[in-house]
């Protein structure tokens, strides 16, 4: 499964944000991830977005190698920020 959505950027406009690619363990090693990534690229182009963006952790060498095969730009300058909130349900 390729989980993505459209997000907007002040600088680049409409972007496809790839949240995750999920391949069940039994199907790993069979190019399923590659096919999902390629189909996500096609979806992004069909939606006429400016770019496709995602995040990868710096220690995830297999994923980094995977993305580099697509000539992806992996930006070392951005720092991810977050605020956590406790939900009182």
Image (spheres, rainbow, N blue to C red):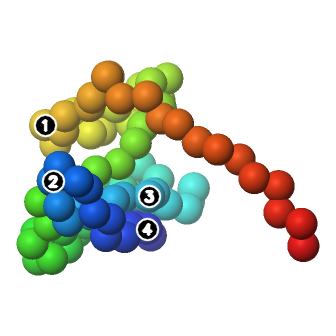
Residue, disc 3: 19
The part of the image, by quadrant, that contains residue 70 is: top left
Can you give x and y, in whole percent of width and height, for residue 80 in the image?
48, 35
- C-alpha gap between disc 2 and disc 1: 19 Å
Q: Which residue is under mark 2?
A: 12
Q: In the rendered structure, are the residues bearing label 4 and label 1 in contact, judged by CB atoms less than 8 Å apart?
A: no
- Residue shown at the point (27%, 39%) measured from the top left: 67
Label 1: state its secondary structure. loop
Compare marks 4 and 1 and give the one earlier in the sequence: 4
Work out how far the residue at label 4 is from the one at label 1, CA to CA, in angstroms.
Answer: 21 Å
The x and y percentages for residue 87 are 83, 63
Give the tally of numbered discs.
4
Tell which circle, 2 or 4, labels the residue nearer the N-terminal end. Answer: 4
The residue identified by callout 1 is 71
Q: Residue furthest bottom?
A: 46
- Which picture quadrant has residue 24? bottom right
Q: Secondary structure at mark 3?
A: strand
Q: Please identify, in this view, whether the residue under mark 1 or under mark 3 is nearer the observer.
A: 3
Side of 10 where 45 appears, left or right? left
Tag 3 or tag 1, which sits nearer the N-term? 3
| Residue hosting label 4 | 3
Mark 3 or mark 2: which comes first in sequence?
Answer: 2
Query: Among all residues in the image, which is located at the extreme front?
Result: 10
């Amino acid at each position: 499964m390729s989980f993505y959505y459209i997000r907007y950027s002040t600088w680049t406009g409409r972007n496809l944000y790839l949240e995750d690619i999920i391949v069940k363990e039994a199907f790993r090693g069979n190019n399923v991830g590659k096919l999902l990534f390629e189909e996500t690229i096609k979806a992004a182009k069909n939606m006429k977005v400016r770019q496709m963006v995602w995040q990868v952790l710096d220690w995830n060498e297999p994923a980094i190698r995977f993305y580099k095969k697509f000539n992806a730009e992996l930006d070392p300058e951005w720092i991810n920020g977050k605020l956590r909130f406790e939900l009182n349900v």
